[in-house]
Image: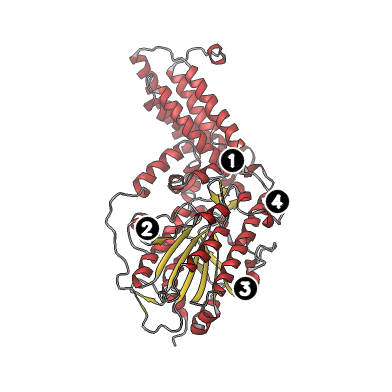
Amino acid sequence: MLLQRFKLKPISLLTFNVLLAIWLGVFLNAAFYQKMQALTPYTGLKAGLFVAASVGVVTALYLFALQILNWKWTAKPIAIALIFIGGFAAYAVNTLGVWITADQIQNMMQTNIAEARDTWSWRLVIWFIGMVIVPIVVILKVRLKPESGLKQVFKKIMALLVSLMLVGGLLFIFYVDFAAIFRENRDLKGMISPQNMIAASVSYYKKKAPKQNLPLVHYGEDAQLSQALKGAPKLMVLVVGETARAENFALNGYAKDTNPRLSKQDILNFSQVSSCGTATAVSVPCMFSGMPRVDYDERLASHREGLLDIAKRAGYQVTWIDNNSSCKGTCDRIGEYKIPEPIKQKWCKNGECLDEILIDSLKAYLETIPKDDQRPQLVVLHQMGSHGPAYYKRAPAAFRVFKPICDTNAIQGCTQEALINTYDNTLLYTDYVLDSLINTLKNTTQYQTGLWYLSDHGESTGESGMYLHGAPYAIAPSQQTHVPMLMWFSSAWQQQEAKQIKCLAQQSKNKLSQDNLFPTMLSLLDIKTKVINPKDDMLQTCPKP
């Protein structure tokens, strides 16, 4: 009944396009204009004029595009699609400070139901109603005036000329400012909705979308174990962390004690480590690929053998145990341990599991290994870690030590103190999980045991208006790229490899990165292959025996 009473006067197609351009250009992009104001050197009136010019350029460009695309029979479908896409993109940019890039589209394509559900909140519902549903209802109710084809074409030509003149004039007046800002901040376009979502999707499908039936590229085919192996076989546990940032680790000097247990273990902590990417879909395949970040080819990595394949070829039993949204293709050709149902029932709820499932799963897996099995082992544990925005779900009640907490996934509405406390509690829980894994390995006497922990990327928790992760690497804050890394070795391993351990300890404050994982891990596992890059192998700096 309400929709039937709600009637609007007919408007021309030009008026429709102008109003739509204003909606897309002005109302969806407040965060972009705030960023432009922050990047300009001006203050006062001149800063205001520059922001107004930015609004004018974006709106005029949208009007130009709409005059080409929108005709009477296409106007409403295109408008609805743009408002729907733009509404969601603008929510991410304006409320979470997330820039829409091809990497973000990749994250969206690879997420699971549980992760997607964690992003839903009452704020998103309110935004969706106000910024998507209401405008779409208005569009459906609008009636377009009938106009002759000749008149419509004339209006379009005039509007196109006016749009070009407006864009050209404003860019001419502020050319130096626009050129300087976009030269240094090329990814700013990721803040302009809805073009960011459209452009990022096109970029994803052109550059990142997995191609089907590509031939497997073999890599490290010469891999073999060193002939000079001593003592019991090795068992290395590699823990791939999730969304942990180094600056919140007490081991790295953070004020709050987020590492009470690890600080008592005999570990090697590396305080200056950077990630390959700012999202799991990039960092995890990259760190296992053998390609350094600057040369990383995502398409090639998707169908080329990596670290785990090479270790398997050399004679290791390689096993992946997952508590996240998959291994991103890195474990496709190795064994993935199926977590027993009783363990799942103990730690899982609504499709998500606490990371203690990894402790029990590792113990259960080790129990399946026959006592006379002399194969060396590489086990990868993939954490849920500190995955946001529902940080409060990542740590059980006993680890909610830092208070007050943010017990919602609408993290923008929490105080900075509560949000940081909740995030820190997830790190406190990770500290417990890693400590428990180390203690498990201490009791595993069948092997020389070691543990290597490395987070995939960091996280923004409101700094500079940014939340979560996935920012373009060139402009990503240190919170998203500076990640924790630590190692632990059993007494048996330390006795056999004393010089290696001493060398690693000397690099605790060196600038390192996920590039170091591939070559250093292979060397630690006594695997010889020509694909090890000595420049990134931390053990290559060790004195030769």
Spatial distance from mark 1 to mark 4, Cα to Cα?
18 Å
Q: Which badge, 2 or 1, is on the more N-terminal residue?
A: 1
Drawn side of residue 91 relative to residue 313, left or right: right
Residue type highlighted by circle 1? Thr
**Which residue does the numbered mark 1 point to in the structure image?**
95
Of all residues shown, which one is farthest toward the right?
Answer: 404
Give the number of the disc on residue 265.
3
Crowding around mark 1 (Cα neighbors within 10 Å: few <14, some 14 to 19, many 20+) is: some
For residue 75, above or below residue 445? above
Frontmost residue, 175 versus 465: 465
Spatial distance from mark 3 to mark 1, Cα to Cα?
40 Å
**Which residue does the numbered mark 4 point to in the structure image?**
417
Marks 3/4 in contact by CB < 8 Å: the verdict is no
Closer to viewer: mark 4 or mark 2? 2
Q: Quadrant of residue 120?
A: top right
Closer to viewer: mark 3 or mark 4? 3
Give the number of the disc on residue 332.
2
Spatial distance from mark 2 to mark 3, Cα to Cα?
34 Å
Marks 2/1 in contact by CB < 8 Å: the verdict is no
Residue type highlighted by circle 3? Gln
| Residue 130 on image: x %, y % | 58, 28
Drawn side of residue 531 relative to residue 136, left or right: left
For residue 462, above or below residue 438? above
Q: Which badge, 2 or 3, is on the more N-terminal residue?
A: 3
| Residue 110 on image: x %, y % | 44, 48
